[in-house]
Amino acid sequence: MPRTPLLLFVLCSAVTLSAAPLKVFILAGQSNMEGHAKIETFDHVGDDPATAPLLRQMRDADGKPAVCDHVWISYLTGRGDQNGEGHGKLTAGYGSRQNPQQDGGKIGPEFTFGLTLDKAVREPVLIIKTAWGGKSLYHDFRPPGAGVYPRTPLDVEKNRLLEKDSGRYYRLMMDHVRQVLADPKRVCPAYNPAQGIELAGFVWFQGWNDMVDRQVYPVPAKGDKTPRYAEYSRLLAQFIRDVRKDLNAPQLPFVIGVMGVGGEQPNEHVAAFREAMAAPAALPEFRGRVFAVPTAPFWSAELGAIADKKEQVRQRRFFLDSKHRDHANADGRMTEAQKREHVARFEADLISPAEAALWERGASNQGYHYLGSAKTFALMGQAFAETLLRVRGAP
């Protein structure tokens, strides 16, 4: 008799999980959507009392990366023409991968995005992630409604940015989404065909290649008030329209992860790009269904300060190799051993042992990859999910 209530509860829970459509979320972008935060930096998340509870979600009782109860993922990625899929229950390791089918030891926003949904949504969830490093919106992800990328004379001269490749990664993204949705049960065993699917949200996290491209987005001449990145805003708005059209989801909620590398004091060009990224969310046609989520607040200022010092060390070594006239090796007579000793002394004077230890604990990549900080990527993924949950009216 005492076992009956428990059995009833289990049966009711199973019914609840299958009583609503499978919730599908699409994540797309370039290297920061891939994710370059090594799992070894998880401990740093727990050093801050404000994020310590998040770390407890990221790990199980044995201290290993948590595995979601009812969130599955299909991840298309690759290098060059070699693309492949990794799929299974969501856990850590679905960040940047050398082999698409093997755990890469890293996380991107998808990990805590899924953990947040796992906690808030009762029905099964499927994440379809497509991400490749070093990809632009103006060419690689170019939406079909924007037409073929107009090549410049320099593109022709260098035989790059070919017309046939314009929008290639948009097509790869859409083809993979359609492939997964044609047979959701292959990736998500909890899928119930009788209940169907619901396209519940799209997250776009990209921008670096566009932001630094002075050919496509030239710096305005002095006195020219034209926004430098207006074309990015136009392309992103068209991207949203085309994604919705191609998925037959005209009201699909859409999150734009606004570039936040460097934190909350950007230079004028970075600030202009962030404004351009966020601009589509303010268009009347998208109001209430498209949201710009700043990621600058999640940049680690303490790790960023150490990164600035490490850049000084790198420049010191560069000047030694270049025999800079204002440097210790102006005559070029220093041996390799002397150079290493000189740089080591410079680094020891500049970066304290405590800072070096903090760097080892919290950072695992370059600044343009948010320093490979699990704390930063965890907060971003959580923020993206919470934004889409608010659209649904979920707590």
Image (cartoon, grey):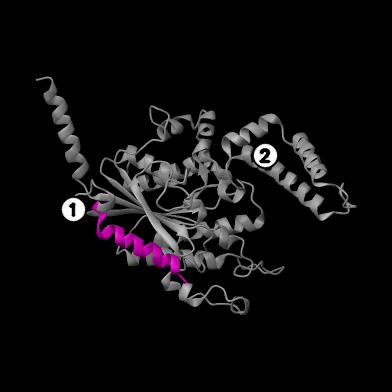
Front residue of this view, candidates 130 and 200: 130
The quadrant of the rendering that contains the C terminus is top left
Q: Is residue 312 visible?
A: yes
Q: Give the x, y percent position of residue 141.
A: 46, 65
User: Is-magenta flag for residue 174?
Assistant: yes
Amino acid at pointer 1: Pro
Q: Residue furthest top?
A: 2
Q: State the residue at coordinates (54%, 68%).
A: 231
Neighbour class for label 1 at 10 Å: few (<14), some, many (≥20)? few
Which mark is first along the chain, 2 or 1?
1
Q: Is residue 254 visible?
A: no
Helix, strand or loop: magenta stretch: helix
Whether 308 is drawn above or below 152: the answer is above
Q: Circle 2 is placed at which residue position?
A: 306
Q: Give the x, y percent position of residue 350.
A: 75, 37
Q: CA distance from mark 1 to mark 2?
A: 52 Å
Whether 14 is drawn above or below 132: the answer is above
Which disc number belongs to residue 193? 1
Q: State the residue at coordinates (77%, 51%).
A: 318
Q: Give the x, y percent position of residue 288.
A: 39, 54
Amino acid at pointer 2: Ile
Q: State the residue at coordinates (44%, 44%).
A: 381
Segment colored magenta: 166-185
The quadrant of the rendering that contains the N terminus is top left
Q: Give the x, y percent position of residue 351.
A: 72, 35
On the picture, is 136 further left or further right than 83? Answer: right
Q: State the residue at coordinates (89%, 52%).
A: 330
Asked where in the image residue 217 lies, by quadrant, the reply is bottom right
Q: Residue furthest right?
A: 331
Front residue of this view, candidates 185 and 279: 185
Name the element at disc 2. helix
On the picture, is 149 further left or further right than 355? Answer: left
